[in-house]
Amino acid sequence: MVKTTDKHVIIVAGGKGLRMGADLPKQFLPIGGKPVLMHTIQRFRQYDENINIIVVLPHEQQHYWQELCTRHDFTIPHHVADGGATRFHSSWNGLSAISDNNDGLVAIHDGVRPFPAIDTISRCFEAAAQTGAALPVVPVVDTLRHVGQASRTVPRDEYRIVQTPQVFTLSLLRQAFRQAIDSHRDEDLATAFTDDASVVEACGHAITLVDGNRENIKITTPFDLQIAQTLLATEH
């Protein structure tokens, strides 16, 4: 079991908003009068006021982010790291922003998931402290069909929807990412690993599943933005 007092979160916010159909990247779109990304950061600050927050943004978006922070008087301490060409590279850049002298636990979270429950975050950190790696999931409620030469219904109780934050011990995550970089061509990393947990699984470490929360949606479409506005209104 690792020392749980050292906690970090890497919030990856590299979206360009293409599916949203908006000029602004989706992490900067407002809900409740404030950019989505600020709500996300605030949720982790509410979980632990001492958590080390690293926000990964494309370099060309960082000046605008600073302007938004000034405009909204947003003063939660955080560091900014450059986004990479892919999600894998962005996560690695965020991880590299944490000194090798630091240990403890690190969460990687989607910048456009502003509603992880505090209990969900806590469960992920607690499980990772025990097993090294944990992520939140929710049950599938719709009927699923596998599409192939002939489509067929598959048992939905054998599947789960994966969310973030995905939490790991720092030493394990560093080892997994370095192994992935050493064993894959740079252009293959994005397709080889669908999320950060898959990087850890590739080095032979099992992932512990914990209960997520249904409200922990990823905002990628205009419909998601409408749901987010409703969720935010119900919290106040």
Image (spheres, helix red, strand yellow):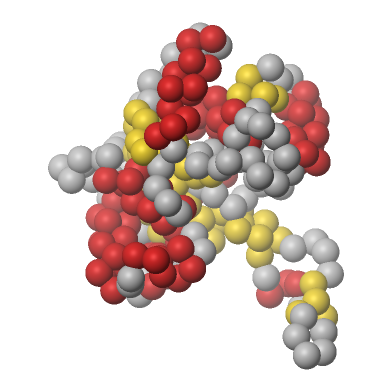
Q: Position of residue 87 (x, y in %)?
A: 46, 53
Q: Nearer the viewer, residue 150 or 49?
A: 150
Left or right of residue 171: residue 56:
right
Q: Residue sitting at 42 percent across and 51 percent down?
A: 85
**Quarter holding the N terminus?**
bottom left
In this rendering, is residue 70 above or below 188? Answer: above
In this rendering, is residue 51 above or below 163? Answer: above
Residue found at the far left of this picture: 101
Q: Total number of numbered labels? A: 0
Q: Is residue 146 in view from this perspective?
A: yes
Left or right of residue 104: residue 221:
right
**Quarter holding the C terminus?**
top right
In this rendering, is residue 19 above or below 63? Answer: below
Q: Position of residue 44 (x, y in %)?
A: 49, 32
Q: Residue sitting at 48 percent across and 10 percent down?
A: 70
Residue found at the far bottom of this picture: 149
Q: Residue sitting at 66 percent across and 32 percent down?
A: 23
Q: Nearer the viewer, residue 66 or 209?
A: 66
Q: Position of residue 125 (x, y in %)?
A: 43, 46
Q: Position of residue 213 (x, y in %)?
A: 66, 46
Q: Residue sitting at 27 percent across and 40 percent down?
A: 97
Q: Is residue 39 in view from this perspective?
A: no
Left or right of residue 34: residue 165:
left
